[in-house]
Amino acid sequence: MTPYVQRLLRAALPPPQRPKHREDRLKALAGAFQTVALAIVAVGLVTPAFNTPEILTGRKMLAAASMASLLEGISLLILLYVPYKDEREN
């Protein structure tokens, strides 16, 4: 491989991931899922309860709560992949 191709590939390809980078990306992804779950609860449950309670049905409440729970579960599964070191002080 010529030096020109090596420089081109080095510029085009992302650098190798370090454990800290992977941990930060996983935490950011889990945070995004948690934010979406909170938004679903706010839009699906809280806002209709304050504005027009007659529109809020049991089916809509169940759908919003189950979707938010599913997304929260996905975020917790993502956080399981974050390595935590057990640091104990002696």
Image (cartoon, grey):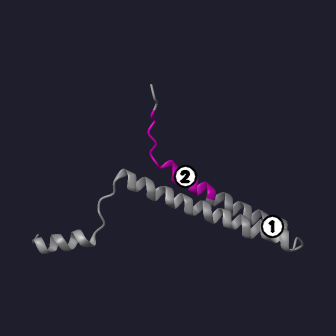
Residue visible at 54% across and 58% down?
Answer: 30
How far separated are the C-alphas under marks 2 and 1? 27 Å
Amino acid tagged 2? Leu
Instruction: Please identify the residue farthest to the top as the structure is shown.
Output: 90
Residue 56's image quarter?
Answer: bottom right
- For the record, the magenta segment spans 72-87
Q: Residues within 10 Å of mark 2 (few under 14, many from 20)?
A: few
Q: Quadrant of residue 65?
A: bottom right
**Lateral position of residue 45 relative to residue 85, left or right:** right
Residue 62 on image: x %, y %:
77, 63
Of circles 2 and 1, the one toward us is 2
Q: Quadrant of residue 57?
A: bottom right
Which label number is shown at residue 59?
1
**What is the x, y in percent for residue 79?**
52, 51
Mark 2 lies on a secondary structure that is helix
Is any atom of residue 56 visible in this view? no
Residue type at mark 1: give it: Arg
Say few, some or many: other residues with alpha carbon within 10 Å of mark 1 (under 14 / 14 to 19 / 20 or more): few
Horizontally, is 19 left or right of 30 in the view? left
Q: Magenta stretch containing residue 77, yes or no?
A: yes
Residue projecting furthest to the front: 90
The disc at residue 77 is: 2
User: What residue do we see at 56% from left, 59% from top?
Assistant: 31
What percent of the width, then of the height, locates residue 53?
Answer: 88, 70
Residue at 45% across, 59% down: 25
Q: Is residue 76 visible?
A: yes
